[in-house]
């Protein structure tokens, strides 16, 4: 009899959250009453003037060949395999307005314009 066996390995978290970000995200999870297998999904969506752009959302996900599961700051998280290495070392910070910002050492601003207006910082607000 052939049985399919699934092995799930949680990898080291590529990201860290400050206490304010954890509070913001925990409040959303509590208010929305998500299902138990719902995780915070963080993905690198592309590169813009100020560096990486991100997709951040909650979804019911399971580990597969394209999805990496990890925990950080008491939050259950997931990302795609392409984003995992790009997110390593990222710190997600929250502010009093409920915004999240990303400080990612792998994200390099690409703007070469003299008309940039200073948008090319190391942090990306979401």
Image (tube, grey):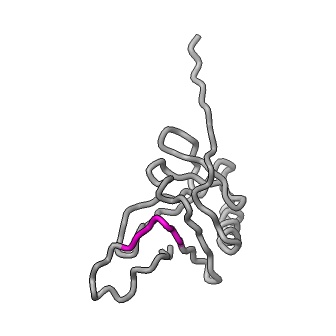
Q: Residue furthest top?
A: 1
Whether the magenta-drawn stretch holds residue 107 is answered as yes
Q: Residue at image x 51%, y 59%?
A: 87
Q: Is residue 36 above or below residue 102?
A: above
Q: How many marks?
A: 0
Give the percent coordinates (x, y) of residue 98: 61, 78
Give the percent coordinates (x, y) of residue 103: 53, 72
Placement of the N terminus among the 4 image quadrants: top right
Give the percent coordinates (x, y) of residue 32: 66, 63
Choose between 23 and 123: the one closer to the eye: 123
Q: Residue at image x 49%, y 38%?
A: 65
86 displayed left or right of 70: left
Q: Quadrant of residue 26?
A: bottom right
Q: Residue at image x 62%, y 76%?
A: 94
Choose between 53 and 86: the one closer to the eye: 86
Q: Is residue 80 above or below residue 115?
A: above
Give the percent coordinates (x, y) of residue 33: 69, 59
Q: Residue at image x 28%, y 87%?
A: 114
Q: Which residues are magenta?
A: 102-109
Whether the magenta-drawn stretch holds residue 105 is answered as yes
Q: Is residue 108 above or below residue 114?
A: above
- Secondary structure mostly seen in magenta is loop
């Amino acid at each position: 009899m052939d049985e399919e066996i699934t092995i799930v390995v949680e990898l080291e978290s590529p990201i860290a959250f400050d206490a304010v970000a954890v509070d913001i995200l925990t409040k959303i999870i509590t208010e929305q009453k998500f299902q138990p297998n719902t995780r915070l999904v963080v993905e690198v969506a592309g590169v813009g003037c100020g560096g990486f752009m991100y997709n951040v959302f909650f979804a019911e996900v399971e580990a597969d060949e394209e999805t990496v599961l990890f925990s950080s700051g008491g939050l259950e998280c997931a990302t795609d395999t392409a984003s995992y290495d790009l997110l390593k070392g990222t710190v997600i910070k929250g502010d009093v307005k409920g915004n999240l910002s990303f400080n990612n050492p792998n994200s390099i601003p690409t703007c070469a314009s003299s008309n940039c207006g200073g948008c090319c910082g190391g942090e990306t607000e979401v």
